[in-house]
Amino acid sequence: MKKRRLLSLMTAAAMAGSLAACGGGNQGGETTPAAAGGGETAATTATETVEAKEGQTVMRWSIWDKDLTAYYQPLIDEFEKQNPDLKIEMVDLGSSDYQTVLGTQLTGSGSDFDIVTIKDVPGYTTLVNKGVLEPLDEYIAKDNVDLAAFKGLTDQITVEDKLYELPFRSDFWVVYYNKDVFDAAGVDYPTNDMTFDQYDELARKLTVDVPGQEVYGAHYHTWRSAVQLFGILDGKNTILDGTYDFLKPYYEMVLAEQEDGICQDYATLKTSNLHYSGAFSQGNVGMMNMGTWFIATMIDKIKSGEYTDCANWGIVKYPHADGVEPGSTLATITALSIPASAPHKEDAWKFVKFVCGEEGAEIIAATGNIPALMSDGIADTISSKDGFPADDGSKEALQTANLYLEMPVSAKSSEIEIVLNEAHDNIMTGNTSIDEGIADMNEKVGAILGGGQ
Amino acid sequence: MKIKNTKTRVMRVILYVVLIALALVMLVPFVWMLSASFKLDKDVFIFPIEWIPKNPRWRNYVDIWSKIPLMKFVVNTVKLTLIVTFLQLLTSSFAAYAFAKLDFKGKDTLFLAYIATIAVPWQVYMVPQFMMMRSMGLADTHLAIICLQAFSAFGVFMMKQFYEGIPSELCEAARIDGMNEYQIWYQIMLPLSKPSLSTLTIFTFVNTWNDFLGPLIYLTTESKKTLQLGLRMFISQFGSEYGLIMAASVLSLIPVLIVFLSLQKYFVEGVAASGVKG
Amino acid sequence: MGKKTIDPALVQSKLSVWEPRLAELQRQAEAETDPKKKLKLGKQVDRTRDKIRQIKTGERFSRQTKRDMVAYSFILPNFIGFAVFTLGPVIFAFVLAFLKWDGNSPMEFAGFGNFALMIGNTRFLASLRNTVIYCVATVPLTLAVALGLAVLLNQKIKGRNFFRTVSFFPYVASLVAVAAVWNMLFSPAKSGPINMVLYSLGVAAKSLPKWSADKDWVMFTVVLFSVWKNMGYYMVIYLAGLQGVNGELYEACALDGANTWQRFWYITLPQLRPTTFFVTIMLTINCFKVYDIVYMLAGGSVGVLNESAIVLVYHIYEEAFRNWNLGYASAVAMVLFLMVLAITLVQFRGEKKYAN
């Protein structure tokens, strides 16, 4: 009996020992079995186990969706070709909890990231407040980077006269429409110049309410941006104002549409977790407002044969308020930063400058995504991509007049975001009336803005 | 006598009807998973649900192996789960014996300290814990996950409660027979606590197998990631592949069910009772 | 150990301290009327007696110390890991509750500042209210259902293994799947299965609840969901506990002519006491720490919980990782901890009283 006990204890000790071994010494040289399957995976897993050659500096770059984002690898390849002494190693922190994981990784001084991708403005504000990002102004001044090329975007992300990130990707919102739905209803396609009234009228004309064969003229995803931010496009108000009465007409329009079955019910969409791509690809949605990031998905999935009921599609500019020029829309940016704890800041800046600069923009555009640096040539690159709608209207829709960030930078961005989300949800589910919801926003955002100063 | 028979028979029928109804309600999520695992992502959340897909996509079960290094993730998860479960069982049942059957200084305080940590949400001590682990060089290692999971207070607490159900007279008798405490633990307590050891095995196995937050924070290198992190790789910023996620989830349920089924035989009445008799 | 030479003078001087102490303790124990204090004093008497015996024999460790050391040797393997990786960080988190810290800048002492912030925070107050409502509803319900299920599935019935496995299913199945199915059953649409039943029972279409999207019904939905998802888990614990019930007691009881209900009430339940103690505490703690199921049911695509559904741990999460107010988040956790501790201590007391 005793022997058996001893044996089991020894096994435990041996196991603990072997753990320590496999825990510590796994850094390089390991090949994953999946590297053999599928070219995409093979290429990307290879970079992970990349070993620095003599005299090479390896820099760690935090990203998400490594295998699903087409431009990471081409960007790295081109950069490494130009800088043979530098190697970039991607570290995928996952999409859904990216900001949480990044924030934790950058906590304290032990992080070894050289370049980090910033997913959204609240995330950016958080990290700036936390003091873990390096201001880029000196680097920008030193290398004479022309910020004017970003068309005012960098002004919107400047915090107390300092810029901590440089955008490389800038998506903006357009209206996607399904030509088959319009044809079936005998309605003309939407144009790049329509007012909200015209848009609403169009949506109503498309709608069919026969049970079992419903067609919805419009579709609004459950994000607050999809409805709430119609209100800021006339340039008279911003979402950080503290008073939100200007949102009322837009909520009235959408709630009326919901009531009449023109669009799907918000509460059902919310609880069923239906993704906007799932809704649009069913082929029973006439128009859907969504960001330009959806272009690449549409092209890919139609090509692969997954989307069959929306293969005949187009995009137009956002509707606009009376008396405002068309082309004003919402923007959301993805940017690069250098952590204050980065081991190789100078080299990291080289990479940031490359990705956010013109060369980087070309590479990003070639994959069908919208770079932050929009020149005339780049719009052509995107619209000439195979699978992009061939009509002139869709091409023209890529030209924007004014870009408003979905959430502008402010020390209070993330707190205000929570209030706005909650009010949006309450109004859309009918838990509160529009007036109550707006009063709630006014009160709470007012308190947040007043409390901090 | 006859009346009583019919009465029991009616009771039996009612019992089975209730059980079958319950079983159906419990099975719905699994059926949903199975059905979704044969669909394209765009169709997964469509309402009303199409329970039997018109064009089942068997490909989902092939694609999950090539789109992410799933095999590697499975190997990692199996390794972590086995080690954690083993360590947890060993150290918990060992410590629980002292808490349940021995009298020593500071017992209550120590035990309360154990329970107290269960009551603190991980979210608040995650950051200090992470910084400590990183300074020990454990960030991005499997050892970090093992240290995190293997010494949980939960196991000690549970085993202690079960040991308390075993009559102390057994231990006293053994002591009189000249056994030392280690022998009592090994020769009397362990064999008698098979149901509770099975329970702890099941729970630890399931927890480690399904753990998401721990690996998310600690494991950043792809070749070290686990199954649950792998599942999240199908969820991307601009869309997700729920068909694939469900296919992989269905597969990942299999080991859990095997463990549950194979340990169920220990949930048999009278284990402790027979111990008293013997 | 006992071979050490004994210095009689030293022994005498030591004894002159300890022996009067023993006499005093014995006197006190005699006089004490409160049984609890009497027990405590009795233990002290034993320890002192042991000490005197140790002094007389000249052993380096008293019997009690030896016994303690054996006990510690049992606990040690687990305790080392537990102390370093859990207890340490937990204590650090407690200290954090009195600091202002974003995880990066130098820490500042905040006193009770973090606690004062809570009082004015509507999201904190809402999360406190929702968590308490959730716990009060979920704990007894889950306990009852799990026990009932375990007793049912502990009988000799056909397909027992199948039913047991199936009950464990909602707990192990992917949360995405379980939540999707639940939200499908409780769909806010008129065509949702539950709403269809309500509609046919005469509830007006306008007043049909929107379940997890409805501010008045969301907690109700979450409670039902949670019972359904977790009862299998606690059932397994009860099932294991039931295996420890002495079968002979049932036989004796049957001879006395007790019916099923009486057997359950007078034998099963008292025998399951340690299990119930464990289940209740774990259930209470887990309910106070509820987070992911609320998030999955009511978070929507944005993943933000409204004041109608926010719970404490979600509030902690959002303050810690969205706003990096680690001090404040720790303070909230402290409130949660104190509530759980209070409840646990009451249960601990009850358990001790019963055991004696």
Image (cartoon, grey):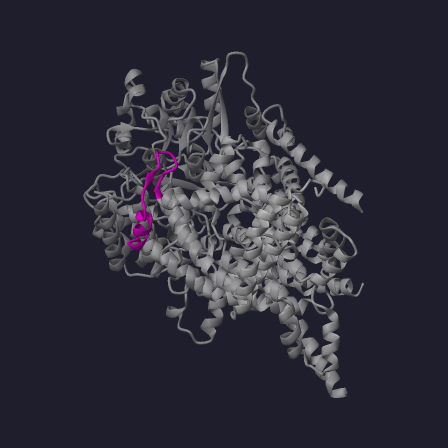
The quarter of the displayed image where residue B62 is located? top right
Frontmost residue, A51 versus A292 = A51
Q: Is residue A103 left or right of B174 when viewed as pictured?
A: left
Q: Is residue C91 left or right of B228 when viewed as pictured?
A: left
Residue at coordinates 67% horizontally, 33% vertically from top-left? A17
The quarter of the displayed image where residue A12 is located? top right
Q: Position of residue A302 (x, y in %)?
A: 50, 39
Whether residue B202 appears in magenta in the rendering, the answer is no
Residue at coordinates 72% horizontally, 63% vertically from top-left? B169
Position of C149 relative to C311 (above/below): below
Frontmost residue, B96 versus A280 = B96
Q: Position of residue B90 (x, y in %)?
A: 67, 46
Frontmost residue, C350 versus A101 = C350
Q: Is residue B237 visible?
A: no
Frontmost residue, C278 versus A24 = C278
State which region is magenta: C99-121
**Residue most extreme to the top:** A54
**Residue most extreme to the front:** C9
Q: Is residue C198 visible?
A: yes
Whether residue C107 appears in magenta in the rendering, the answer is yes
Position of C92 relative to B1 (above/below): above
Q: Is residue B240 left or right of B168 when viewed as pictured?
A: left
Residue at coordinates 79% horizontally, 56% vertically from top-left? B177
Q: Position of residue B5 (x, y in %)?
A: 75, 83
Quadrant for the C terminus of chain A in the image: top left
Q: Position of residue C186 (x, y in %)?
A: 48, 63
Count the marks.
Answer: 0
